[in-house]
Image: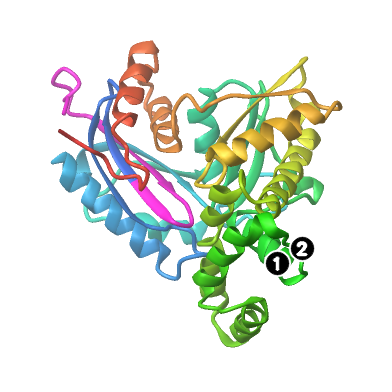
Amino acid sequence: MSDAGGDPRFVIAADAGGTFSRVGCFALDGSLLGSATGRGGSPYHQADAAANVADTTVRALQDAGRDAADAVALVAGLAMVSRAGSNQGDGDNGWADDFFRVPGLQCERLILNDAVVAHRGALLGAPGIMVVTGTGSMILAIDADGTEVESGQFEHYAGAARHLAYEAVQLILLGAAGPDDDEFVAAVLRSWGADDVPGLRHVILGLAHVDRMEVRHRFGALAPLVTEAADRSPLADRALRDLARKTARGVGLLAPLIGGDRVTVSTTGGLATTPAFTARLADALDEDTYAPAALVPAALDALRGAALIAYGTVGAATNRSVIDRLHESQQDVRPDGTVARS
């Protein structure tokens, strides 16, 4: 752990989605001081979202060995936070204050939509489009002037992990599966505890009295089965390509706002970053002759995007060496968001 050459100041960055909450404490030179991962921070998907994020923040501070009172800035990307100009939500983000009720935390807090911090990390402030597809979904464009527009402002929604599962399950129930789909269908039936397709229909109908949040979680948990089978099962491939095409349409709606010969697009989220999805999204973007786009890997993750924004709020440098240190610590992040340290 670094203390940035003896400078005791540090920033807190947070990225809270539907499945995981991640919080990191970063020195002003880009070094990771400590971090923690907790349960999801989206109030749409987790009833205890605020407590999850607050607890994760406390544990990140403990891991860093730092006092909350010494933080000079906190920037968080939270799912469901309304953006200025968005037609999503009522624009009142006062509810998010409860997410950072941490003893001793006195610094200024900037709470943004999680797609905004993901965009900053992925494209390092350059204009382009961010595709967020995991437990939730958003396609966000930010132009050279910093203007933000999401595809939802055109009444467009591509879908998230659960929507991919909805599509696959519906195709199975419609009898669209062929012989090459047997392995995939069997895996879906096992996941629902059903013996056959009529049994699956019965299980789905039985969800009528189950809490809707739990139903979303159950369907969302099926998404990895679809992505893992997509190269072997025509039905899984069909469901994933449908989502990719819907996503590409959202990119196409936003691309003219960015301008240029080819718009830069990056992805974040548990589904959007899988090779199965990115390959099909790249195909869908190539097929869209109206909005030429280049799909690029994210330079930094959303957590480090939040750190970059935090540096800006206190006038700290964000030069190449800082970005390199942020990237170096990112290499130790496991798939579940926890940090592997030797």
User: Counting other residues with Cα less than 10 Å from the Cα at mark 1, is it few (<14), some (14-19), or many (20 or more)?
Assistant: many
Residue placed farthest to the right in the image?
290
With 35 as the anchor, is 43 left or right in this view? right
Residue 275: x and y, percent? Answer: 55, 36
Residue placed farthest to the front in the image?
179
Instruction: Report the front residue among 167 and 53.
Output: 167
Q: CA distance from mark 2 to mark 1?
A: 6 Å
Residue 257: x and y, percent? Answer: 77, 28
Instruction: Report the front residue among 198 and 339.
Output: 198
Task: Name the residue beneath numbered marker 2.
Answer: 176
- The residue that appears at 26% across and 48% down in the rendered structure is 105
Q: Amino acid at mark 1?
A: Ile
Q: Amino acid at mark 2?
A: Ala
- The residue that appears at 74% across and 48% down in the rendered structure is 242
Task: Name the residue beneath numbered marker 1.
Answer: 172
User: Which quadrant holds the N terminus?
Assistant: top left
Range covered by the magenta-colored residues = 1-22
Q: Which mark is residue 324?
A: none
Mark 2 and mark 1 residues within 8 Å of each other at the beta carbon: yes
